[in-house]
Image (cartoon, rainbow, N blue to C red):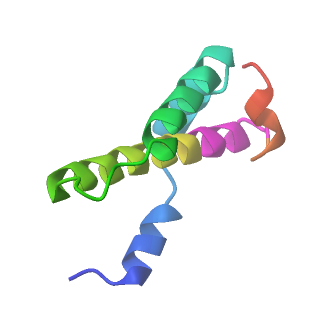
Amino acid sequence: MPSWQDFERDEQAKAPPELAACCARVLAGPDGRELLALLRARLFDAVLGPAAPEPVLRSREAQRHLVRDLERWRDQGLAALGGGEKGARNRPL
């Protein structure tokens, strides 16, 4: 059974360089930023009621995890391209 350290280690894992570069190219521009904002609004801001079935809750958490991964990989790709972790998010590639 995984421990909390396993989950934290996964969160900090580096993406393969090709994946990070691809995420930076696709998600750092205006359309990519808009897509991530829409996904965040749909998956993080929408609240499921207390009667939501467990499979729905698990699916929602997996979707949220994917969005966080895409954002992290985009940031890693930007950093590798010399754009830095934070400020380059708004810079077109």
Foreground residue, 93 or 81?
93
* Vertical position of residue 92 compared to residue 69: above or below: above
Give left or right: position of 41 versus 85.
left
* Vertical position of residue 22 compared to residue 74: above or below: above
Q: Residue at x 58, y 26 (%)?
A: 27
Res 4 quadrant in image: bottom left
* Vertical position of residue 71 compared to residue 30: above or below: below
Foreground residue, 31 or 57?
57
Residue with the most extreme top position: 31
Q: Residue at x 43, y 65 (%)?
A: 10
x, y percent for residue 3 = 33, 84
Magenta residues (range): 74-83
x, y percent for residue 60 = 31, 47
Q: Residue at x 46, y 37 (%)?
A: 19
Quadrant in which the N terminus is drawn? bottom left
Residue with the most extreme right position: 87
Residue 7 forms part of the magenta stretch = no
Quadrant in which the C terminus is drawn? top right
Foreground residue, 23 or 21?
23
* Vertical position of residue 6 compared to residue 26: above or below: below
Residue 16 in view: no
Res 54 quadrant in image: bottom left
